[in-house]
Image (cartoon, rainbow, N blue to C red):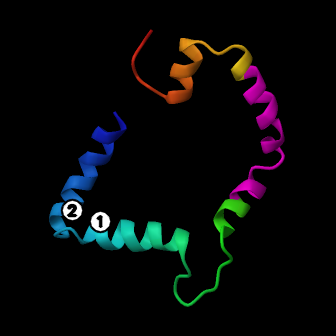
Amino acid sequence: MTLVIVSAWGIPALMQTHGLFWKVGMGEHVVKRGTQAFNGRVILPFYYFATAFLSLLPWIAFLPLVWKHLRASWNAQTALLLAGSPRRI
């Protein structure tokens, strides 16, 4: 379903920009900004992972408890919910 929604605006954007949407929009403004210095700025390695971890505090503290609960009650339904599949059991 997500692919259908993204395709509804992504395909026309690719056609109008003759493929530059993917190269510049996704390649430079999404991937390149997340992995290397952009516009002459200096970033530390793994800066975005560290800031994501910090921004999730204090909720990240519950991750081990959630993981333990998921593993204790693991079945087809929890696997399906974790995978996000639209298929019903």
The x, y position of residue 11, in whole percent, is 21, 54
Residue 71 position, x and y percent, is 70, 21
Estimate how packed mark 2 is, as few (under 14), some (14 to 19) or many (20 or more) residues with alpha carbons within 10 Å.
some
**Closer to us: 73 or 57:** 73
Q: Quadrant of residue 25?
A: bottom left
Q: How many marks?
A: 2
Tell me the quarter of the image containing the C terminus: top left
Q: CA distance from mark 1 to mark 2?
A: 7 Å
Relative to residue 30, is residue 61 depicted above or below?
above
Task: Please give left or right for residue 66 compared with residue 16 in the image.
Answer: right
In the rendered structure, does residue 64 fall within the stretch colored magenta? yes
Residue type (three-letter) at the residue carrying disc 1 = Trp
Q: Secondary structure at mark 1?
A: helix
Q: Residue furthest top?
A: 89
| Quadrant of the rendered image containing residue 76 | top right
Q: Left or right of 10: which side holds 18?
A: left
Looking at the rendering, the stretch of residues picked out in magenta corresponds to 52-69
In the drawing, does residue 79 fall left or right of residue 63?
A: left
Q: Residue at x 77, y 25 (%)?
A: 68
| Location of mark 1 (residue) | 22
- For the stretch drawn in magenta, what is the main secondary structure? helix
| Residue located at (81% from left, 35% from top) | 62
**Quadrant in which the N terminus is drawn:** top left
Residue 18: in magenta span: no
Q: Residue furthest bottom?
A: 40
Q: Quadrant of residue 60?
A: top right
In the figure, 27 relative to 69: above or below?
below
Q: Disc 2 designates what residue?
A: 14
For the residue pair 5 and 47, the one nearer the viewer reads as: 47
Q: Residue at x 41, y 74 (%)?
A: 28
Query: Do the numbered discs 1 and 2 sit on residues whose CB atoms are within 8 Å?
Result: yes
